Image (cartoon, rainbow, N blue to C red):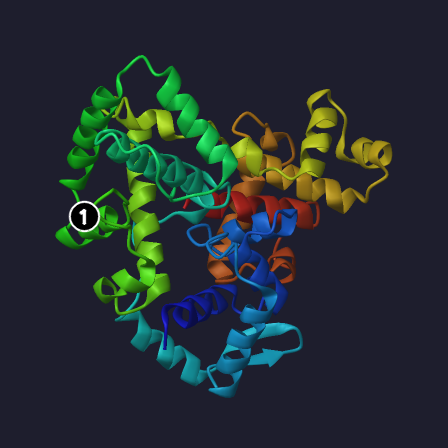
Amino acid sequence: MNYFSWLLLKIIKKIDGQRSSSGIFHLLTGKRSAQTIQDAFLFQCTQIVGSMKEMSRQAYEEAIRKLVINDLVMLEKRAVILTKNGELKLRALDDIFHLPKSYNASRFEWNGLTNFFWERLSLTIQTLSYVNIKQYTFIPVTYKMNTQRWVKSYLTHSSSTYQEISINLHKEIKQFLLNLSNEEAELFVSRLTSPYKTGKTYSQLSHLYQNDPLYTKIYFHSILHRLIHEVKSNSDYTFLKKFIPVLNNIQLLTASATESKKLLDIGKTMKEVSEIRNLKESTIEDHVIELALFDPLFDYESFISAEQMEEIILISNRLGTKKLRAIKEKLPCEINYFQIRLALTKMEENN
């Protein structure tokens, strides 16, 4: 079985029948909805949420169908659950595949940060390598106009010469690669294009990672995640830092949550916001949970006390479940479902 099958089995086990097949699809593709955002944290799927943004619904349904045919999962009502054979297969695949430690889709994939960074960096390196040998026409590694405009602007307006940029980028990338394994360094360098070589595809490089193109891609992106993290936190990477677009967690908020935030910020209650916006109060509750996750300045503690948070987490851990009804039955009646969802989501964020 391939890496994608392993990934599906892994998520299905985490969800444990508590979400529909569609919910799993939305996690993988990173649907920008309050439910998907909450589920990513609630079921400890932040590392992989949005990692398969380009996957079609048809491809997903076909993959699930094959798992059902092979008696690895079963469909129960709308939920997907691992069978005993699925549990055994997952354990066997765990010895072959894994998610690299530095891979974090919620931080680097969901908002497009990794693609922005790599497209800018790879096109700049390609451009400099051609210009340095006075060859000014070439087939670019990306035809995206916003990337091409950014690279042109960067090279044109930089206070450094092309040669200085080349030397410093080489120095900083080399410094980073020295901390990688030989296999990882080879993967990174092999993806770059110059006048002397064309960057290799994931299929061409899959011999490095179980002959699986998707596994190879995930590993490559994990290297980029690590690089972006180090560049952001280390002042030595002054040239590479310029390639990171200014994005933050606020941009993960859905547009509707952003509108609710404006009203909450001026002191409106959730009930008042729902009336003003003509939305269900449960929808505003979803927005509050989004804000608690992605806005570091948002005061979610005005909706739940520290004692209530602690009590909810204690019951969840004791019961070994995140099922809201089971937890609610063991709590005082004044604690509502919204507060349980908020507590569980914040708990997973902090893990």
Q: Observer-nearest residue: 61 or 74? A: 61
Which residue corresponds to the image point at 34% horizontal and 35% vertical from the top-left?
121
Q: How many marks?
A: 1
Element type where label 1 sits in the image: helix
**Residue 102 visible within the image:** no
Answer with left or right where residue 143 lies relative to residue 250: left
**Residue depicted at 46% across the width and 34% down the height:** 147
Residue ID at (73%, 20%)? 266
Percent coordinates x, y for residue 46 in the rendering = 46, 50
User: Residue 112, percent across and down?
Assistant: 48, 42
x, y percentage for residue 30? Answer: 55, 52
| Residue annotated with mark 1 | 185
Q: Depth check: give the residue in front, 34 or 185.
A: 185
The answer, for residue 12, to whether it is visible in the render is yes
Q: Residue furthest top?
A: 159
Nearer the observer, 91 or 168: 168
Rendered location of residue 260, percent (x, y)? 72, 32
- Amino acid identity at mark 1: Ala
Q: Work out whether 121 lies above or below 84.
A: above
Quadrant holding the N terminus: bottom left
**Which residue is more in the foreground, 322 or 55?**
55
Query: Where on the picture, by quarter, is residue 245?
Result: top left
Position of 320 relative to 31 (above/below) = below
Q: Quadrant of residue 292?
A: top right
Image vertical order of residue 74 relative to residue 4, above or below: below
The answer to whether 266 is drawn above or below residue 143 in the figure is above
> What crowding class fits label 1: few (fewer than 14 Cα within 10 Å), some (14-19), or many (20 or more)?
some
